[in-house]
Amino acid sequence: MIAIVDYGVGNLFSLCASLKKIGAEAIVTRDVEQLEKADKIILPGVGAFGDAIDKLYETGLVPHLLRMAQEGKPFMGICLGMQLLFERSFEFGEKEGLGLIKGNVCDLSADIPQSLKVPHMGWNKLEIRAKDEPLLKYVKEGESVYYVHSFYAKDCEESIKAGSEYHVFVPGVVRNGNVCGTQFHPEKSGETGLNILRAFAEA
C-alpha cells in the first residue's frame, strides 16, 4: 500500500491513476493511522514552496512524516514535494523545508540565460549519474521525462542520482537513504514515468 499525502497541494488524480495503471494499491490520506499502516509514502506538490510547507504543517502531519522517514519507511517527494524534502527554499523569501535531504531550493532564472524560459517546462532527457539507483531500475540513459518548475535543488551533489541539462544541471532524481524524490512529474512522463513509479512500488 502506498499512501499519498493529502495536504491540499498537488495533482492527486493523475498520480493515483498512474499508480493504479501499474497495479499498485494507493490511498490518498492525511490520517496518521493510514500513513502508519502504509508500506510507502508519496509527498506530491505543485505551486509555491512557502504555501505548500505552511499547508503541510497545518495538517499536523509533519512530526509524524519526519518520524516515519527517519524510521526507514520508503518516502518519495514529487516535483514541489521533492523540494520540500530539502533544508530550505529561497522562493519568495527564505523558508525551512523538512531537512530530510541536504541542500537548498533556488531560483532557476538566476542561473540560466534570459533566452531560456522559466518555468522550465516540457520534456528533457535524463542523464543518469548513479546506475544503481533503485528508482531508475527500469530506466535507460537518455529517456525523457516531463518537468514543470521555476526553482531547483542546489548544494546537494551527494544526493543527485540523475538529472537534466537546462544550461545548468537540474537534479531530477535525488536520494538520501530511504528518502528520494523526482523534480519531474513521473505521472506525466509516459512509460518512463510509470517505470519509475513501478520501481518505487517494488522497492
Image (spheres, rainbow, N blue to C red):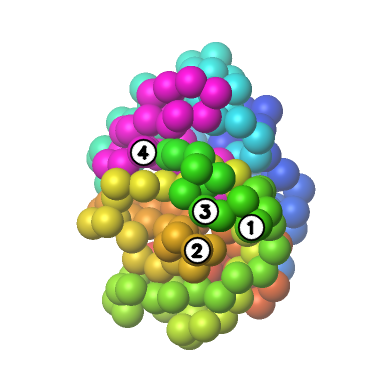
Label 3 crowd (10 A; few <14 / some 14-19 / many >=20): some
**Tag 2–tag 1 contact (CB < 8 Å):** yes
Circle 1: residue type: Leu
The alpha-carbon separation of the residues under discs 2 and 3 comes to: 6 Å
The residue closer to the viewer here, 146 or 40, is 146
Q: Which mark is residue 104?
A: 4
Res 123 quadrant in image: bottom right
**Tag 3–tag 1 contact (CB < 8 Å):** yes
Q: Which residues are magenta?
A: 79-104
Q: Position of residue 152 (x, y in %)?
A: 48, 47
**Tag 2–tag 3 contact (CB < 8 Å):** yes
The residue closer to the viewer here, 147 or 36, is 147
Q: Which mark is residue 112?
A: 3
The alpha-carbon separation of the residues under discs 2 and 1 comes to: 8 Å
Q: Position of residue 119 (x, y in %)?
A: 66, 48
The alpha-carbon separation of the residues under discs 4 and 1 comes to: 22 Å
The alpha-carbon separation of the residues under discs 3 and 4 comes to: 17 Å
**Tag 2–tag 4 contact (CB < 8 Å):** no
Label 4 crowd (10 A; few <14 / some 14-19 / many >=20): many
**Tag 3–tag 4 contact (CB < 8 Å):** no
Circle 4: residue type: Asn
